Image (cartoon, helix red, strand yellow):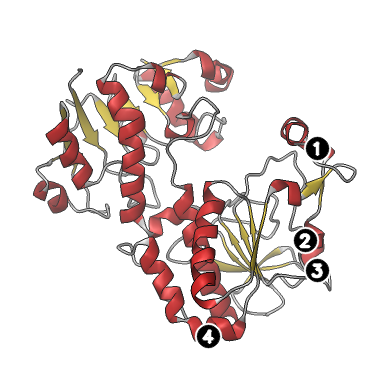
């Protein structure tokens, strides 16, 4: 069995990410059960402090250049890239994102191997490592928090980074009386990881306090001459039309958790927002496709300032709660950061199973499809990026 040394990277992207690839307890477990050494690059922004790692027997260092595998969450700052190392993080470059082109070029120049969590999948192409579930959980909480603030009907505090999912649900239950009196009706779009997280919270609070909600699958949202065929929609989404107008008169809150392709129809359009039938005035957009299928999502927001108002009349942002007829939007694009401790614990378990253990057993095939660069060269799957890099 191969021996490896893992370095847990300090997050350097702004705004700062407080999640980790491996928790202190997981790093300790690897050290005790496998031929693995783990060090943590010193950081003052992680949900787990340097002293938390030290207490679990994990060395805290500044220099990680002697590590075999460097694991982070978000993109690594270009000037901190170490030549000829193996990195794993969400690189956001394989879809030819222009803002990360300089990062990809430098990875190639420094002969770095880059494996991207997003492309570690099973035989059916389903992602094995993701934070999406927690995005759905936090989206429900923020949606209710925003609704209560907009209509002054109940009050939920900002999430605490040491909360668990169950603690978040308990906070909602504590506001049972105000929420039941306001009785918001909630529409959720999407049945993937994000949608499952949202449904878990809504199922939990519905059992304990009663709340009306509906979850839409893609087949509920689009049609092609009155029918829906999955393969056709995947390959030719432009053939389909939106059915979203069927739902806007029956719900107060929209929680968007669906995947959307730019060729697919738009769902909550400006036209629908202006319709006299529309009752949806609060949107929690966990998908956060800017100017995409939810047309009031015109920019991402932050955890410190998660909400803004959109006026369908002016098609732009206006002061928050300046008019109850506006659409109040939550579009934080790093929702799992609100529950970083529990989210990191779940993520770390997936990372151990899908990255660390296969590497220990020299099972490179598991990571091959997710490796974008190998020693600075594009791998076969990602060769389409070649012209873009130049």
How far across and down, in percent of the image, does residue 318 sit?
A: 64, 71
Q: Residue at x 55, y 34 (%)?
A: 98
Q: What residue sits right under mark 1 in the picture?
A: 238
Q: Residues within 10 Å of mark 3 (few under 14, many from 20)?
A: some
**Residue at mark 4 to residue at mark 2: CA–CA distance:** 30 Å
**Residue at mark 1 to residue at mark 2: CA–CA distance:** 19 Å
Mark 4 and mark 3 lie on one chain; the one further toward the N terminus is 4
Element carrying mark 2 = helix
Element carrying mark 4 = helix
**Residue at mark 4 to residue at mark 1: CA–CA distance:** 43 Å
Whether residue 266 is visible to the viewer of this picture, yes or no, is no
Q: What residue sits right under mark 4 in the picture?
A: 178
Q: Which mark is residue 270?
A: 2
**Residue at mark 4 to residue at mark 3: CA–CA distance:** 28 Å
Q: Residue at x 69, y 73 (%)?
A: 326
Whether residue 130 is visible to the viewer of this picture, yes or no, is yes
Q: Are marks 4 and 1 in contact (CB under 8 Å)?
A: no
Q: Residues within 10 Å of mark 2 (few under 14, many from 20)?
A: some
Q: Nearer the viewer, residue 267 or 77?
A: 267
Q: What residue sits right under mark 3 in the picture?
A: 274
**Residue at mark 3 to residue at mark 2: CA–CA distance:** 6 Å
């Amino acid at each position: 069995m191969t021996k490896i040394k893992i370095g847990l990277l300090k997050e350097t992207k702004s705004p700062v990410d407080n999640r980790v690839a491996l928790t202190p307890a997981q790093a300790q477990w690897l050290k005790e059960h496998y031929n693995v050494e783990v060090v943590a690059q010193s950081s003052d922004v992680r949900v787990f402090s340097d002293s938390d790692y030290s207490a679990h027997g994990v060395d805290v260092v500044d220099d990680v250049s002697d590590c075999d595998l460097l694991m982070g969450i978000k993109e690594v700052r270009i000037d901190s890239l170490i030549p000829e190392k193996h990195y794993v993080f969400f690189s956001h470059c394989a879809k030819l994102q222009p803002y990360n082109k300089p990062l990809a070029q430098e990875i190639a120049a420094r002969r770095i191997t880059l494996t991207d969590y997003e492309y570690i999948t099973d035989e059916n192409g389903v992602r094995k490592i993701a934070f999406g579930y927690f995005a759905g959980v936090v989206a429900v909480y923020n949606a209710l928090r925003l609704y209560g603030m907009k209509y002054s009907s109940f009050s939920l505090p900002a999430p605490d980074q040491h909360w668990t999912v169950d603690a978040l649900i308990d906070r909602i239950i504590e506001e049972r009386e105000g929420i039941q009196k306001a009785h918001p009706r909630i529409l959720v779009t999407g049945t993937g990881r994000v949608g499952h997280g949202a449904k878990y919270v809504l199922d939990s609070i519905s059992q304990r306090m009663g709340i009306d909600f509906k979850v839409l699958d893609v087949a509920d949202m689009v049609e092609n001459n009155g029918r829906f065929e999955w393969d056709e929609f995947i390959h030719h989404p432009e053939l389909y039309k939106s059915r979203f107008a069927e739902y806007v008169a029956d719900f107060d809150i929209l929680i968007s958790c669906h995947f959307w392709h730019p060729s697919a129809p738009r769902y909550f359009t400006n036209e629908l927002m202006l319709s006299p039938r529309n009752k949806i005035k609060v949107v929690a957009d966990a998908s956060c496709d800017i100017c995409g299928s939810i047309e009031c999502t015109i920019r991402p927001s932050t955890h410190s300032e998660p909400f803004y108002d959109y006026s369908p009349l002016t098609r732009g942002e206006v002061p928050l709660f300046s008019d109850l007829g506006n659409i109040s939007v939550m579009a934080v694009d790093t929702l799992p950061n609100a529950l970083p401790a529990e989210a990191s614990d779940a993520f770390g378990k997936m990372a151990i199973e899908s990255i660390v253990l296969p590497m220990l057993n020299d099972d490179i095939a598991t990571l091959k499809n997710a490796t974008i660069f190998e020693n600075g060269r594009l791998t076969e799957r990602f060769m389409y990026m070649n012209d873009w890099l130049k």
